Amino acid sequence: MSDEFGAWQLILNGDPTLLAIVRLSLAVSLSAVALAALAGMPLGALLALTRFPGRSALVVLLNALMGLPPVVVGLAVYLLLSRSGPLGAMVIAALTRQTVEDLWVEYRDELSAMDVSPAGRMTTLLWDARFSLLTALLAGFGRAAAEVGAVMIVGGNIDGFTRTMTTAVALETSKGNLPLAMGLGFILVVIVLAINAAAWGTRVWSERQAG
């Protein structure tokens, strides 16, 4: 009970160490999702709207990457000597490809009759799929914020630089500092729940808008 009380004290008093870890976690997760989206969404749309030799193999590869354990992803990024790595973009590309491909089946005749350019088709379908893609991005953010293995392999656990909520929870628990670990764990659960609620709400709202 004393550990739980200490955790609530840290949260309610705005403990500087706790807040610094939370801020860094949010900054890292949001940046990772944004960079992956910038690369992955156009790639996924391009893959959905074009046909070329080896396309099927690339689709299989992208789909397979979504099932990789995060620790393996972290190891791969470390070996590639890349701070952000291409794997997150590939996962978003796979999700985007499926969404845009489904829309292309629905709008192909209309866009072809209007003689819309390939770039115009890509832009139109991405915009039309924006709510579905936002749901995928929110889910991706929740996954990124809750991951510990990949973060520890790629960035370590350096205070003020790479110590995120998940790595801090692991460290503080091993040190016996349960109030801080529990406080961070509670905030992490709240963030993940909020992200999933936002994804669900976005999907429901978009379905209502579409009628």
Image: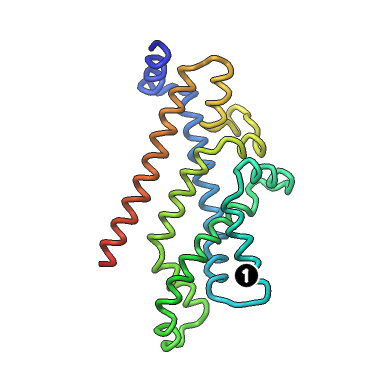
Instruction: Give the residue number, with chain letter if any, for mark 1.
Output: 56
Relative placement, left or right, of 128 versus 58 is left
> What amino acid is found at the position of numbered circle 1 in the picture?
Ser
Residue 126 in the image: above or below residue 70:
below
Quarter of the image for residue 167 reads: top right
The quarter in which the N terminus is drawn is: top left
Q: Position of residue 68 (x, y in %)?
A: 61, 48
Q: Position of residue 126 (x, y in %)?
A: 45, 68
Residue at 49% x, 17% y is: 178
Q: Nearer the viewer, residue 106 or 89?
A: 106
Residue 46 in the image: above or below residue 13:
below
Quarter of the image for residue 109 reads: bottom left
The quarter in which the C terminus is drawn is: bottom left
Residue at 52% x, 35% y is: 24
Residue at 56% x, 55% y is: 91
Q: Position of residue 143 (x, y in %)?
A: 50, 43
Relative placement, left or right, of 164 versus 201 is right
Q: Nearer the viewer, residue 46 or 64?
A: 64
Q: Position of residue 110 (x, y in %)?
A: 39, 84
